[in-house]
Amino acid sequence: MRIWSYINTSFRTLFLHRGFSLLTLFGLSVGIAMSIFVLEYVYYQFSYDKHYRDSDNIYRVVSKGKLEDEYVDVALTPMVLASRLQKYPQVSALTRIIDTSEKPVQSDYAKAYESDIIFADSSFFSVFSRPFLLGDAKDFLSDSTGIAISRSVASRLFANRNPIGETLRINETDTFVVRCVYQDVPDNSHFKYDIVLPYRIVEKQLKEHYGQSYKEIEESWFSLITYIYIRTRPGSDTDLLADRFNSDVQPEMEEQRDELFDPRSQTFLNYHFQKLEDIYLFSNCDFEIGETTSPLYVYIFLGIAFFILLVTAFNFMNLTTSRALERVREAGVRRIFGARRGSLVVQFISESVLFSFIALFLGLVLVELLLPYFSDLFRMDFGDQNYREHINMSWVLVVTLLVGVLSGLYPASVFSGIRPVHLYTGQNRFSSYPGIWFRGALVLIQVFVAVLLCAVAIGMWRQMDFVKNYDLGFDPQNLVLIERARYLDEDVDSVISELSKIDGVSHVSKMYSNPGDPVSIMSFNLAEDSTRTYFLSVFYVDCTVFETLRTEIKSGEVYCNDTSRVLINEEAASLMNISKLDGQKLQTMASRGGDIIEYPITGIVENVYLGSLKNILRPAMFVPVQSQEIPRSLLVRYSDVDYSSVYSRIKKVWDRSGTGAPFQGGLIEERLDNFYREDYRYSSLATAFAVLVVIMASLGMTGLVSFLMATRRHGFFLRKIIGFRDFRIIRSLFRGYWGFVAAGVILALPVSQMLLNIWLETFSVHYYSDYLCFIVPAVLLTGIAAGIVCHGVGKLRKQMSLHQF
Amino acid sequence: MIHTRNIQKFYQRGEHVRYALQNINIDINEGEFVVVRGPSASGKTTLLGLLGLVDAPSGGEIYFKGTEVAHISDSERDKIRREHIAFVFENFHLIEDLTISENIELPLQYLPFKHKQKRKIVDDLMERFRLTHLKRQFPCRLGDLTQQKVALARACSNSPDIIFADEPCGRLSSGECEEFMELFRQINEEGTAIVMATHSEDNSRHGQRIIQMFDGHVVSHSTEGR
């Protein structure tokens, strides 16, 4: 029954000291709400691909090694690997996958542009289990026309009709029959697929494209073109399997290597098995099939969640003990009337546990209210039912209980330690310094975290600003990219002509790859030195594109419609030691008796970053494409007119073209920003957390100042009566306080610099951190600390009376 | 009920030793009303603290109902206080966050009473001290005399054998003090021993026996009171 009495008293305390309770509950509930968001986000990040049946037995084969001077770590593998690996008894199922770009897909009832299309072997669903809504996995890909589609695609293209046996036309020309419909792939999957097409279609296309050379590609251990996923039998040792496989195929690989590469080179490739569950967070491979992220962010946010909970608990301790004198008296009276120490401990802990559960309730209300904002910030639909299923309430309750116990532990141990004689003789132990050391340490940690997060947040925004203003080798302003140009077919030139007539449009060029798209890398020799191989990114370009981009051709010129004469960037020129154009030629590497093709270098263009600044600038080759080639997109430069009017007129031209495909286009600058959306997101998150922790730290400092005011008020009044100036009083009364604030600030500076540098290293170019991002939070926190002290002293001055003595 | 033999209490700071009490030999009998009188710093409060088992002496012996209690553990002291002893203070020491009835009930929380029993004891005490109408009030809204009455009701709630009162009239006017002392006297007449510390000669007259203190010594015993 006594526990009810404690709860009753706790509620009473809550209502009687409304201001204090609001302050405490605010800190606790915001802390709990933020922690729920962060921890659920972290949990979600770790849940990727775990929805597949026996997901721990699914692996992806990746290629690691060195090709000439180039280290490779790619998610792609050679096609030949599949047939060899399938023979091993540890492998129960294997599928090859190739992803493809957006395509128009048409049923008898509707048309849509689908982007999540893959080609896969018939064993695909043996590796990746999906619940089938209609049809069966065994029906899938029973011939080269059978395909599987997701529930969403079925709904888009067939509405409520049964799609089984219905035909789908992809790319207008290829006709397939729907064999099965599977449940949509959840968002927490490292790659998505709405339509699965037979892999043999790819094989057929490759055969058509490469002709007689196809056999070479199919048997090559160095043509990395397909993704391979396997399901192993339970209990298989994949490390052992990888070792065995690599040693088994080594003779065959060495034979090919000696034919293809310079014998003196260190070329080698090994194949590794990467756990499916680890791909999203831990894969560092190039040429990923889908989206991946860095575990660094997840760990940082896990750390932040831990700190927020810690700071929240510290705050509660600090604010609770700031009412020390009142609570000391209460504890003393209880002790005088025979209360055991244990019962006081239970009382204070139950009080803080009650507080944290009320805070949890308020925190959950906050979570609901802040859902749209945080969904936006975390780029996750927290309101989605799938996500909500992940929230484990019992786990949340345990964390809340822990916060409550942790928060109540210190006040409980201090207050229950009051001896009856202290009340009786009017002593109180809070006038001594040991208490302040602990409380001060709590404030120190809060100030430390606040300065750290503020400095990191400011540093991140400065880097984002640096990225935005970085010289990319072209002028990204007033450039519009019109996608889906391939659907224009032969109308492309008339559309370009129409676009050129729009007021303000100065240039229109064809683009054969969009900024940020994966670029193929090919190996070349210089004709005069065939011993050295160079791996160059190959861009196919319209000869007018440099003018449209405003990229300077440093030397030489571009020859339109001549695919044999190429340009290189300054990086490639530097790599190949070409300072002056003097008839140098690039040539493809001859292999197995194939023809050598030569490309005279006719120009050197300035380094142009068409992708993310997270990737290093690669040596590149630009191949002018013949004008009749269908482009992937169109690039429009305008000037002296506003974007909205240009946009609407461009859209009108597109709509008049009669392509049928919906218009898709926008500013290049927006596309560039999109490369850094993760970084913008984390910068926003760091800012949100920084603001939160600054609020928390302010509450913590308020608690410490209240405590100091309560315990040292007599000292203040005495000094005022003697005639001390406020400044001297503040200095002497809050001596310890300044030390803790300063220590928190000073300790945070090197740590924040270190963390910031780790993040900056993820960019190929970054600003050099200066003092601004460290000075601002230091001044901010010190200013807040001073403000709180001044406010406290003002309050004390109002209470001054001789009756206090 | 309480006997002390040569008790002393001193505080040591470095080499400096300050004696608060020296060679105190006193007896408190059951149902007695004893006044401990003396000027400031004469050792009254320290003596009450030792007799009330709030503090332990630096030397000497204290017997409570025949048992030596000077050197027992804190928890044993807590138990004796819980069951046999109560206090009234100059500053009332009511808990601000508890209502009047909850303040009175406080000592019972640490005793094995059932809820109904506790309610009955509290209701009876409130009726007796005419506090029933203030049942749900908080201490800060009450006058000094009423607060001290609540403190006295709280002291009576565990039916103690002895109440220690340290300057109970310290914050009361003379008229209020008279009224309060009348309550004290009634409680004493019902058999509860009272030991009251005061520096007031006027208040001393309520006691059956006066122990006069000065500079930590008992300088006289007299029966000049009632």
Image (cartoon, helix red, strand yellow):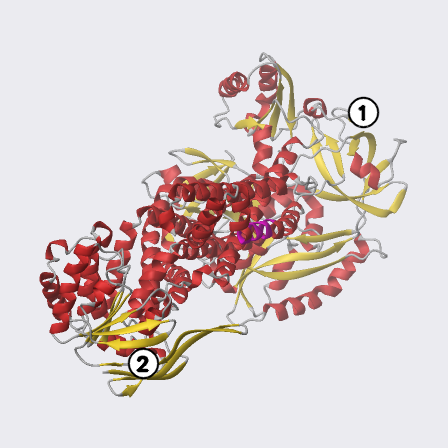
In the image shown, does A554 or A67 lie closer to the viewer?
A554
- From the image, give the main secondary structure of the stretch colored magenta: helix
Chain of the residue on which disc 2 is drawn:
B
In the image shown, does A431 or A346 lie closer to the viewer?
A431
Q: Which residue is mark 1?
A: A557
In the image shown, does A708 or A289 lie closer to the viewer?
A708
Q: Secondary structure at mark 1?
A: loop
Closest to the camera, between mark 2 and mark 1, is 2
- A749 part of magenta stretch: no
Q: Secondary structure at mark 2?
A: helix
Which numbered circle lies on residue B76? Answer: 2
Is A268 left, or right, of B41 in this rendering?
right
What quarter of the picture does the N terminus of chain A occupy?
Answer: bottom left
Q: CA distance from mark 2 to mark 1?
A: 101 Å
Q: Quadrant of residue B121?
A: bottom left
The kind of residue tagged 1 is: Glu
Is B34 left, or right, of A389 in this rendering?
left
The magenta-colored residue range is: A736-745
Place of residue A781 in the rendered image (x, y in percent of width and height, measured from the top left): 54, 44
* Pointers 2 and 1 in contact (C-beta within 8 Å): no
